[in-house]
Image (cartoon, rainbow, N blue to C red):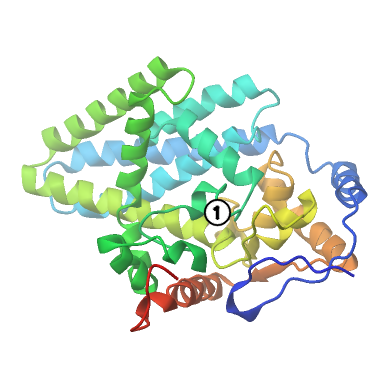
Amino acid sequence: MATYPLKTPLGTEPSSVGSTSRSDFGHLARLVRHEGLLDRRYRYYTAKISLILLAFALGCTAFVMLGDSWWQLALAGFFAVMSAQIAFLGHDAGHNQIFRTGRANDRIGYAFAGIVGISYGWWMGKHTQHHAGPNHEGNDPDIDIPLLAFTRGQTGNKSGFVRWTTKHQAALFFPLLLLEGLSLHWASIVAVWHGRMKNRRLEAALLLMHGGIYLSAVFVVLSPAVAIAFIAIHQGLWGVYMGCSFAPGHKGMPTYTDKDKLDFLRKQVLTSRNVRGGPWVDFTLGGLNYQIEHHLFPSMPRVNLRRAQPLVHRFCVDHGIDYAQCGLLTTYRHVLQHLHEVSAPLREPNFSRSR
């Protein structure tokens, strides 16, 4: 039996999976379709979208009525949650989970992206590449972050300030997430400026509209000091929320290179981690807590992932494939331990970039 040489953190080795039969995923897909788990859930999304947009509208009304008050900082936290929840809906649209056709999903995806102020086309390209090769060194943009290192191989290329942040990345991980929201905005602006997506004019108009309405509302309703504090809290907490939602799915899980020959099923399962919890975790993480099921069936409506989980888990156990899942706090501990372990060479007195 062959064991795939994935690079695994925390001393956890992947199972020996034997010969990789392409029929494995086909069998699983037939089981999932038979249960109707790939069918569209229009009533669910109608209710979900309506309630989130209603809550957002009520928040905007409260913002105007409250006026220039330091109590607005509490609303900044509320809008951070709303921004993340709307971004989750955009994620669902990008995966064709809401409507049957790609065009319909893209239309509503552009709208959601415009509300939160990011480029839908840029994010789609980046996220599609991630799904094609999760945790693939060199191909997955989600593990190619300049200020951090997710593999030992990445530490050797760090120098200057970036080397310092990588050296202390476990301690800096959550503080750095405060900048994630601004990073998403800036990356979107750069992508649109350089025309790295189709519908560039639409994307530019949406970003300008978002920026104009957002900044005008904040600086017209609030005094400068309150406005700056509001923006800092809103964008900072939104970044933390987004980072804390996406990090558990893959960070600290095995990485691989072109030398590792994995079929689709094992590539998606072995590099992903689920987060245990009830409906509150489903809501808080936007369904990303079912990362394994989502990566196997990206177009599966979010609400169906909970039903698919025991079926996929049982299938993996029957086929000897490691299926990772743990509680929310435990997964953050794994992420931080992995970051600390990967950066260990940088803390060695005799470490050299020539290694």
* Spot occupied by residue 190 in the image (x, y as percentages of width and height): 33, 32
Q: Can residue 90 be seen by looking at this rendering?
A: no
- Find residue 83 and report its image quarter: top left
* Spot occupied by residue 206 in the image (x, y as percentages of width and height): 36, 23
- Find residue 323 and report its image quarter: bottom right
Residue at 56%, 68% in the rendered image: 252
Q: In the displayed structure, would residue 102 be above or below residue 155?
A: above
Q: In the displayed structure, would residue 296 be above or below residue 195?
A: below
Q: How many marks?
A: 1
- Position of the N terminus, as image quadrant, is bottom right
Residue at 7%, 48% in the rendered image: 225
Q: In the displayed structure, would residue 307 be above or below residue 173?
A: above
Mark 1: secondary structure: helix
- Position of the C terminus, as image quadrant, is bottom left
Which residue is denoted by mark 1 in the rendering?
283
For this orientation, the residue located farthest to the front is 354
Foreground pick, 260 / 353: 353
* Spot occupied by residue 47 in the image (x, y as percentages of width and height): 58, 37
Foreground pick, 167 / 300: 167
Residue at 38%, 68% in the rendered image: 353
Foreground pick, 263 / 312: 263
Q: Residues within 10 Å of mark 1 (few under 14, many from 20)?
A: some
Residue at 55%, 50% in the rendered image: 138
Classify residue 165 as left or right of residue 64. right
Mark 1 residue type? Phe
- Find residue 168 and report its image quarter: bottom left
* Spot occupied by residue 322 in the image (x, y as percentages of width and height): 76, 68
Q: In the displayed structure, would residue 232 be above or below residue 256?
A: above
Q: Can residue 267 be seen by looking at this rendering?
A: yes
